[in-house]
Image (cartoon, rainbow, N blue to C red):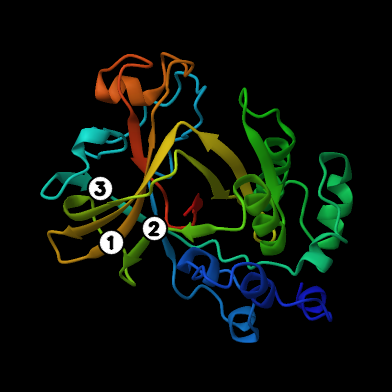
Amino acid sequence: MLALVGSHAVNPEVYWKSVLPNSPMPKAIKDLLYTAERAEAKNTKARAVIGSSVSFTYLSSADQLMYDPNEVLFFIENDLHQGTEMNLHFMKADQKETFLPQQVADSIPFSSNKLLQIYNKFSIKSNSLKAKDVKQTLSECESKGNEGEEKYCATSLESMIDFSTDQLGKKVKAISTDVDTKGSTPLQKYTIEGVKKFVADKAVVCHKQNYVYAVFYCHKTVGVRAYAVSLVGVDGTKAKAVAICHTDTAKWNPKHLAFQVLKVKPGSVPVCHFLPEDNVVWVPY
């Protein structure tokens, strides 16, 4: 891996600045930029994720019933105001794969029918957990997207930028959830201190995948509203979380966990959730 990344490819950070000079790079992306120091480091700072065991896939099946009823995974849009209290759990994950430069990523097979080549290139044993992650990510990337949804798996930061700007235009901002803590935090009560609503009703949401290097499953969603929410926990932990509210849930599976938790019907009210810290949301401005 070090030899691959060490090639004379364009720096992803330079590409970001050239295409998005007015958009600050969010922490979720900065954490994945390749540096010699990070390459040598082992597990340093883990990133926080919210509700990582629950799929936010719109057409989910009914097998999502294993969750802590004391934890808020979904909520309604009317809850997004100063003073609202929610029980949230910012869990720790230690996947620290970095971005490869696009030139390098494009030279590596990324297909289910090239599994053996991928395993060999990265010295992955076919019966290992990492092999399972690789296979699952490729399967998700090759699956058909939801109706009317533009989807794309970005294997480099440059390709994520290109997809997002193709879908939304060059005047876009990337945002991510940022939890101000180095250690793990318990399930605890958080209070909303402030809420900022983004004007657009569309966004590109990119979800970090488990893979050998940084890969994001990106999809353009319409009928959504994005919010930046400031939170503080009872132990003093500060968080700047991204909330996504889906305004049209009429075609979601009626058995989706969100409806069971909120006790509402598809299409009745906007359904909202916070995004994990390693997700990136692109919104027009």
Q: Is residue 84 left or right of residue 56?
A: left
Identify the mark nearer the N-term, 2 or 1. 2
User: Which residue is labeled 3 in the image?
Assistant: 88
Q: Viewed as shown, does residue 118 lie left or right of 284?
A: right
Q: Quadrant of the N terminus?
A: bottom right
Q: Contact (CB < 8 A) between labels 2 and 1?
A: yes
Q: Residue beneath label 1, please?
A: 239
Residue 266 image label: none
Badge 3 marks a residue whose secondary structure is strand
Compared with residue 60, is residue 183 higher up or lower down, i.e. above or below? below
- At a point 81% along the width and 73% down the height, the residue shown is 4
The alpha-carbon separation of the residues under discs 1 and 3 comes to 11 Å
Q: Which residue is mark 2?
A: 177
Please identify the residue farthest to the bottom as the structure is shown: 37
Q: Contact (CB < 8 A) between labels 2 and 3? A: no
Asked where in the image residue 9 lies, by quadrant, the reply is bottom right
Q: Gap between marks 2 and 3, in whole Å?
A: 13 Å
- Residue kind at label 1, given as amino acid type: Ala
The residue at 64%/53% (across/down) is 165
**Mark 2 vs mark 1, CA separation in Å:** 7 Å
Amino acid at the residue labelled 3: Leu
Closer to the camera, 105 or 165?
A: 165
Residue 37 vs 125, above or below: the answer is below
Residue 174: image location, x then y, percent: 50, 59
Which element is circle 1 on?
strand
> Which x, y percent locates residue 14?
67, 78
Name the amino acid, label 2. Answer: Thr
Does label 1 or label 3 sit earlier along the sequence? 3
Q: Is residue 128 visible?
A: no
Residue 10 location, quadrant = bottom right
Image mark count? 3
Q: Nearer the viewer, residue 44 or 98?
A: 98
